[in-house]
Amino acid sequence: MNFTIRKAKKEDMPQVLALINQLAHFEKEPEAVVITVENLQNDGFGEHPAFFCFVAEINSKIEGIALGYNRYSTWKGKTIHLEDLIVNETSRGIGLGSALLDEIVKYGHQLGVKRINWEVLDWNEPAIAFYKQKGAQIKDEWRVVHMDEQSIKNYISKL
């Protein structure tokens, strides 16, 4: 099947959000997505974009995305974080995930980054196998740490 990988455009964001919601259902957190199409359009396509996004398109329909952003490592320097690599359930197994990951790695190489990082759920065995097959290292000894909006508010209220 023929597909195209390209940089996302502002008008792609409704389809991008649909894939984000599909991922949230897969990860058993459908209520966690609060972002809107407008958020994506404003945050990704302004004067200082907060993220970059590549899309996989088949017959003018977006079937996959790779969304990331620039980071800085005190150990390595410039890095990028791959926030999500999503392929529509109905389009898996035809190479979209590989092509999207290829595009992220090429983009990172062009930027001269020293590392590309992302997370994967420990129960997502197909994704873990895919990433290992691509040469990624799974850092089992590291734990993801985050503060959600309520945790931030609670923290600030105690200052």
Image (spheres, rainbow, N blue to C red):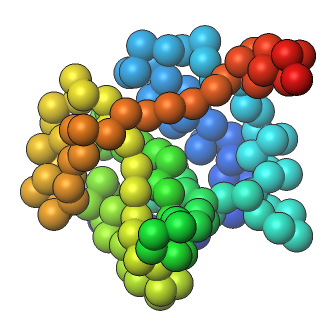
**Horizontal and vertical percent for residue 69?**
60, 60
Q: In which quarter of the image is residue 125?
A: top left
Residue visible at 37% across and 33% down in the picture: 143
Q: Vertically, is 31 above or below 116?
A: above
Residue visible at 34% across and 62% down in the picture: 101
Q: Name the residue nearer the viewer: 129 or 72.
A: 72
Residue visible at 16% across and 36% down in the picture: 126
Please give the count of numbered marks on the rendered protein. Answer: 0
**Horizontal and vertical percent for residue 77?**
52, 76
Q: Is residue 148 left or right of residue 56?
A: right
Q: In which quarter of the image is residue 33?
A: top right
Q: Quadrant of the N terminus?
A: bottom left
Q: Quadrant of residue 26?
A: top left
Q: In which quarter of the image is the C terminus?
A: top right
In this rendering, does residue 53 appear at all? no
Q: Is residue 132 left or right of residue 24?
A: left
Residue visible at 71% across and 18% down in the picture: 151
Q: Name the residue nearer the viewer: 135 or 40.
A: 135
In this rendering, does residue 126 appear at all? yes
Q: Is residue 57 left or right of residue 128?
A: right
Q: Vertically, is 128 above or below 109?
A: above
Q: Vertically, is 28 above or below 23?
A: above
Q: Name the residue nearer the viewer: 146 or 133.
A: 146
Please identify the residue farthest to the front as the structure is shown.
Answer: 159
**Horizontal and vertical percent for residue 71?**
59, 63
**Horizontal and vertical percent for residue 92?**
25, 42
